[in-house]
Image (spheres, coloured by chain):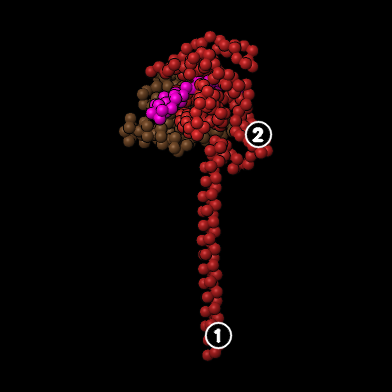
Chain colours: A red, B brown
Amino acid sequence: MLSSAFLAAGIGAVIAVLGYASWRARAEAKHLRRRLESATTSLEQLQLSFARFAPQEVVERIIASGVSTSAEKKTVTVLFADIVGFTALSEEMEPALLVQMLNGYFARMSRAIAEHRGHVSKFIGDGILALFGALEPNPWQADDAVRAAFAMREALEEYNEELALAGQPALRVGIGLHRGVAVAGVIGSQELVEFTVIGSTVNLASRVEHLTRQHAADILITAAVREALDARFALQELPAAAVAGISEPVVTYAVEGVLPG
Amino acid sequence: MVARGLGSDWAERHARAMLLADGMTEHGYEEGLAHLSGAELTTAEAALGPLVRETVWYRTASLQRHAQRIRPRFSAEEFLEFVGIAALANAVCRLSAVADGR
C-alpha cells in the first residue's frame, strides 16, 4: 500500500519534472525565436540604412564576404552632372533653404538615374557622379546613361516649376558623359571606404561636363558614347575643345532628343 | 536579350542561329540586340524588350514597374505566354553557363 503510494508520488514527480522541463524548453524556444526575429529585423534595418551609403549590391557583397578592397577593370559609362552657377547661388541663399533645395534636386536626379539602371557613386558638393555598368555587366549602358540624362532634364523642368511656385530661382544643370574602361571597386582607407571607379574615363567625363558651359548645351557626350548609342538619338557634333589633362582636343556631341521609330 | 544580358555566349550563338533561320537579317539582329529596338522588331517585341532586361537581374520593384507599364497592351494570355518564355529563357541561359565553361 505504502509502496504504491510512493510509486504514484514518484510517477507524479517525474511527470511534474518533465512537464516543467517541457514548459522551460518551450519558453526558451519562444525566447530564442523572439531574439532571432529581433536580430533579423535589426539586420534588415541596418542593411537598409547601409544601402543609403552604398549600392545594395555592394552592401550584399560586403555582408557575404566582408570589406574587400579588391577592384576590377570594367567598361563603364560615367555621368557627371553639376548645377550651373551654384557657387553664386550658395552665396545668395539662406543655408537651410539651400540645403532643402539641393536635397530636393539630388532626390529627383537620383531617382532618374536609378530608373535607368545607373547608380549614384557620390555627391561632390552640388555635383553628381553616376555610373552605368559598374556593378554588373550592362551591354546597354550607353543608351541607359543618355536616357537617364533625358530623365534628369525632365525631372529638373518639373522641379523648377515647384521652385518657381515657392519663389526660388530655377536651376540649370550641365551633364557630361563618357564611356571607357575604369577600375571599379571598394576604395579607401581603413577608416573610410566607398564603392567607386577611378581612371582617365572618370576624369574625361568630368571635363566633358565642364564643356557644357563652353558649348551652351545641357547634355554632352563623347565619341565613345556615340559609338555605342542607338542611332535614333539626335546628336549635334560640336567643335573639338581643349580640356585640362588631355593632350588632344575633345570632340563632343550635344544630345538633342530621340527620333521616333 | 537574356543571353546578352547574362553574357552567355553559348546561348546567344544558338539564339542568333535560330533567329536568322527564322528570317531575321544579320543587321536586324545586331540592331535589335544592341539597342533593344529596331525596324525588324514588332511593336510588341519592342515593348517587351525593357521588361525582358529586367528579368535578367530580377529586381522585384523594377520588374513590377516595367510589367505594369506594358501590361495593358497585351491580353492576359499573351502576357502569360511572355512570362513563360522569359522564365524559360532565363533558365536555359543560366544553365548554359556550364556550356560556356564558367
Residue at the left extreme of this rendering: B75
> Is residue A55 one of those drawn in magenta?
no
Residue at 52 percent across and 75 percent down: it is A15
Instruction: Say if A31 sits above or below B37 in the image.
Output: below
Disc 1 to disc 2, how far (Cα)? 75 Å
The foreground one among A165 and A234 is A165
Residue at the top extreme of this rendering: A239
Magenta segment boundaries in residue numbering: A152-181
Residue at 54 percent across and 89 percent down: it is A2
Residue pointed to by mark 1: A6
Instruction: Say if B74 sits above or below A206 in the image.
Output: below
Residue at the right extreme of this rendering: A190
Question: On the rendered image, what quadrant is the C terminus of chain B found in?
Answer: top right
The amino acid pointed to by label 1 is Phe
Displayed quadrant of residue A54: top right
Residue A195, position in %: x, y? 60, 33
Is residue A95 at least partly visible in the picture? yes
> Is residue A173 one of those drawn in magenta?
yes
The foreground one among B68 and B21 is B68
- Left or right of B50? Residue A187 is right
Observer-side mark, 1 or 2, equals 2
Residue pointed to by mark 2: A188
Is residue A79 at least partly visible in the picture? no
